[in-house]
Image (spheres, coloured by chain):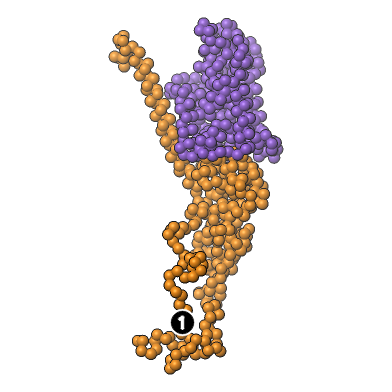
């Protein structure tokens, strides 16, 4: 400092130096602030799995550029389901969300939350609430779901506003008892709106069915993957080899039909002479 | 010694409390009425105004939106819908006319907080503090805009104390009070008027918006000034006064032209010589 303050021609140096230091300070401060906030913003784009956006919400990355956090969707929700995130919540501050387990979307036909949105963060193009995709229900725990235990609960199935389309009960033999049927709630992603009524109503302490973001809930086949039966339908014939009629080895006098099983009293396919009925063909004759 | 602050003692003695606080009282009334309108809905079911300062709908017809938030949204790559755009046009026109930073002193919910910090700072005689450039806010403003474009989000709204406080008061405050406390302490201990006068990009944005606005404070009677310095002491942006008050020799007009003047009117209140008054930019 001493030399710069001397009465040499460089007397204006300190001012310039101070200016440069101030400038550097400002730029560094703002730069650090910006970096920190940028990282925070990036992280805030990852919505926690159980926080669900209102119907029609743009994809999360777009939503956070579009939602101005005015809360009009919150106000116009007749069931007071939505909340604006507070700083301590793990959702981008001020943006609307709901937690289905607390209060699910009531699926208003006129979708007032979307109508209230001034910016289009909730897409005004969505006019049919049954087409909304707030998330996807997943029967996430087969070990505690009462239906999987062989009991008849079905509550999630019965409360589903898109019953028999978004959730169906698929029947399967109960191997444990040997004489009962299990009715397994099964979600169909093309109809599930993610409203969360199933999760809300699950009778377990911790819901076995949960609404998850589609990204978490859905698997994805590789682009190269082909389903044989689809390809067959498309082509009108099997693409791999000429189809061979399946041959059954049947007791004499029986016929077999897919679905119906053994049908007595008909000759069925010809049974080779000299063979024992009820014995697999392979085990007869000189094959062994 | 005035109870309000060290400054304005003479005025208080001469004009009385009411006259020497006229604009301050009006300003508080404005802040209270605006907040009350927003709160009447959630608290009393009287839905005159819905929403918050980012966007509001009055009587279900009049949309008003914050142009700074909308600008960030635009830079983030979203084109807002009609209602938000109408709201922003109204707001731009209003603040262009009355002065952008009227928002800061007459509307912003953080203003009472920082005013309280400034008052306490003077009562406690806290002097000095960190030197922060008053240009910092423009850098912060630029940073928030770059960030909006870079991240595709309205990033500043994640931490903006202004909108957080207003939203918190209306929709539930949660931990927002810690942010507000941080601003208060910053102003109290770190630097005088640190937040509003140095950092806040909202104020910086509105100052640019009001750069050419016709409504101004003018030091019209500047020859009457007795250099008591009271106006400098109460002004949140004291640097804006000097050119207007002392610029006669350099031919600088008596109108305060700096866009950072918040039109709060405290200088008018506090001056015992009635040097200042509200007027038009064009006034001589």
Give me the chain letter of mark 1.
A
Residue ID at (54%, 77%): A259
Report the front residue among A11 and A215.
Answer: A215
Q: Residue B171 occupies which quadrant of the picture?
A: top right
Query: Is any part of residue A264 visible from this angle?
Result: yes
A90, above or below B223, in the image: below
- Quarter in which the N terminus of chain B is drawn: top right
Q: Which chain is purple?
A: B
Residue ID at (49%, 19%): B125
Residue ID at (42%, 86%): A281
Local crowd at mark 1 within 10 Å, few (<14), some, or many (≥20)? Answer: few
Q: Which chain is orange?
A: A
A155, above or below B4, in the image: below
Query: Is any part of residue A83 visible from this angle?
Result: no
Look at the numbered disc 1 and give the secondary structure of its residue.
loop
Report the front residue among A228 and A46.
Answer: A228
Which x, y percent locates residue A24? 38, 25
Q: Residue B234 occupies which quadrant of the picture?
A: top right
Which x, y percent locates residue B207? 54, 24
B72, above or below B247, in the image: below
Q: Is B86 left or right of B196, judged from the image as shown?
A: right
For disc 1, the marked residue is A247
Which x, y percent locates residue B55? 61, 35
């Amino acid at each position: 400092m001493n030399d710069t303050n001397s009465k040499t021609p460089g007397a204006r140096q300190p001012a310039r130096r101070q200016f440069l230091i101030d400038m550097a300070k400002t730029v560094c401060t703002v730069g650090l602030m910006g970096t920190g906030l940028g990282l925070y913003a990036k992280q805030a784009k990852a919505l926690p799995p159980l926080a669900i956006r209102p119907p029609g919400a743009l994809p999360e990355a777009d939503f956070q550029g579009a939602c101005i956090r005015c809360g009009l969707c919150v106000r116009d929700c007749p069931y007071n389901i939505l909340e604006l995130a507070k700083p301590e919540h793990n959702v981008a501050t001020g943006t609307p969300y709901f937690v289905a387990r607390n209060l699910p979307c009531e699926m208003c036909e006129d979708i007032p939350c979307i109508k209230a949105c001034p910016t289009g963060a909730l897409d005004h193009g969505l006019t049919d609430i049954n087409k909304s995709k707030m998330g996807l229900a997943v029967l996430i725990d087969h070990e505690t779901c009462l239906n999987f235990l062989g009991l008849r609960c079905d509550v999630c199935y019965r409360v589903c506003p898109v019953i028999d389309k978004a959730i169906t009960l698929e029947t399967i033999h109960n191997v444990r008892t040997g004489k009962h049927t299990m009715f397994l709630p099964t979600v169909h992603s093309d109809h599930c709106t993610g409203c969360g009524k199933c999760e809300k109503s699950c009778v377990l302490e911790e819901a076995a069915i949960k609404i998850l973001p589609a990204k978490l809930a859905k698997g994805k086949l590789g682009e190269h993957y082909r389903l044989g039966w689809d390809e067959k339908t498309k082509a009108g014939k099997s693409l791999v080899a000429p189809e061979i009629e399946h041959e059954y080895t049947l007791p004499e006098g029986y016929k077999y039909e897919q679905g119906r099983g053994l049908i007595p009293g008909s000759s069925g396919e010809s049974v080779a002479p000299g063979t024992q009925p009820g014995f697999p063909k392979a085990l007869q004759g000189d094959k062994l | 010694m005035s109870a309000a602050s060290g400054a304005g003692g003479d005025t208080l003695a001469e004009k009385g409390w009411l006259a020497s606080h006229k604009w301050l009282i009006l300003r508080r009334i404005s802040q209270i009425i605006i907040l009350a309108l927003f709160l009447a809905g959630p608290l009393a079911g009287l839905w005159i105004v819905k929403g918050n300062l980012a966007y509001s709908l009055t009587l279900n017809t009049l949309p008003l939106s914050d142009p700074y938030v909308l600008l960030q949204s635009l830079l983030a790559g979203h084109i807002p819908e009609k209602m938000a755009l109408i709201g922003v046009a109204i707001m731009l026109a209003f603040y262009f006319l009355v002065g952008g930073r009227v928002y800061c002193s007459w509307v912003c919910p953080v203003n009472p907080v920082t005013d309280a910090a400034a008052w306490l700072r003077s009562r406690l005689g806290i002097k000095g503090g960190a030197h922060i450039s008053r240009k910092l806010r423009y850098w912060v403003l630029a940073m928030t805009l770059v960030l909006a474009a870079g991240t595709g989000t309205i990033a500043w709204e994640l931490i903006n104390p202004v909108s957080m406080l207003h939203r918190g008061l209306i929709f539930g405050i949660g931990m927002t009070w810690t942010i507000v406390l941080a601003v208060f302490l910053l102003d109290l201990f770190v630097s005088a008027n640190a937040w509003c006068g140095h950092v806040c990009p909202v104020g910086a944005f509105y100052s640019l918006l009001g750069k050419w606005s016709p409504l101004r404070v003018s030091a019209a009677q500047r020859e009457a000034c007795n250099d008591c310095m009271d106006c400098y002491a109460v002004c949140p942006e004291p640097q804006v006064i000097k050119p207007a008050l002392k610029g006669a020799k350099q031919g600088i007009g008596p109108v305060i032209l700096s866009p950072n003047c918040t039109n709060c009117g405290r200088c008018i209140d506090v001056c015992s010589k009635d040097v200042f008054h509200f007027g038009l930019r064009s006034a001589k």
